[in-house]
Image (cartoon, rainbow, N blue to C red):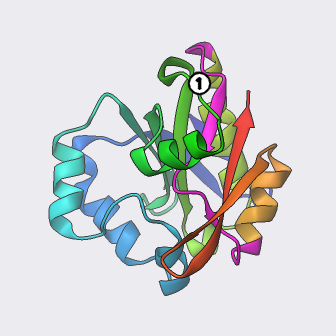
Amino acid sequence: MKIQLPDGRTATIRSLEGTDKEALYHYLQNLSVESRSRFGPHPFDQLTIDMICEQLDKDIQRYIAVDESTSTIVAYMLIQQGMIEADQQRYTQRNQFFLRDNTVTYAPSVADDWQSSGLGTAMVNIIEKELLNRGIARIILWGGVQASNLKALNFYKKIGYQFVGSFWYDNKDNHDMMKEL
């Protein structure tokens, strides 16, 4: 799906394909040190990217946004059916239990120079429509969000995520957040 942002830039939002290996690797390598430190669903090395693109897992949907003017990836978002194990354990400790069939885990990433452009919100809106059509009722942030990441926290609150708890990981305070659709 093609979208136009308020600043006039256009991007196509689509599923990641096997032929996107080089472009995805390039995207991940070009994230700033800060952005890389805040996105952690998988390593950024070529072997991992090759595996992701060659063995697309039906339980994990991967979306990308491609800049229409440069044909480069400018955002990468993952949706996994159910919850990752560490998230499941934390939520269970808080007596929060969710069905795998109607819960997904979400990991977003937007290129530094596209952050605050409206791209993340546009992608979320497209993804959430697809999730609603599949009967998904709840989205959990994959591994939570670092408490120091005020930009991300404000973004999640703006699009309807709720704080559900804190946890300490990798010497950092983190927040679990989720959204009911």
Across and down, in percent, residue 164 comes to: 74, 49
> In which quadrant will I find the N terminus?
top right
- Indicate yes or no whether the magenta region holds residue 31: no
- Viewer-side residue, 27 vs 149: 149
Magenta residues span: 133-150
Q: Residue at image x 58%, y 23%?
A: 130
Instruction: Report the number of discs.
Output: 1
> In which quadrant will I find the C terminus?
top right
Q: Residue at image x 31%, y 61%?
A: 23
Looking at the rendered structure, the kind of residue marked 1 is: Leu
Mark 1: few/some/many CA within 10 Å (<14, 14-19, 20+):
some
Question: Quick check: 83 left or right of 28?
Answer: right
Across and down, in percent, residue 134 comes to: 55, 15
Q: Residue at image x 65%, y 44%?
A: 94
The answer to which quarter of the image holds residue 25 is bottom left
In the picture of the structure, the residue carrying the numbered disc 1 is: 131
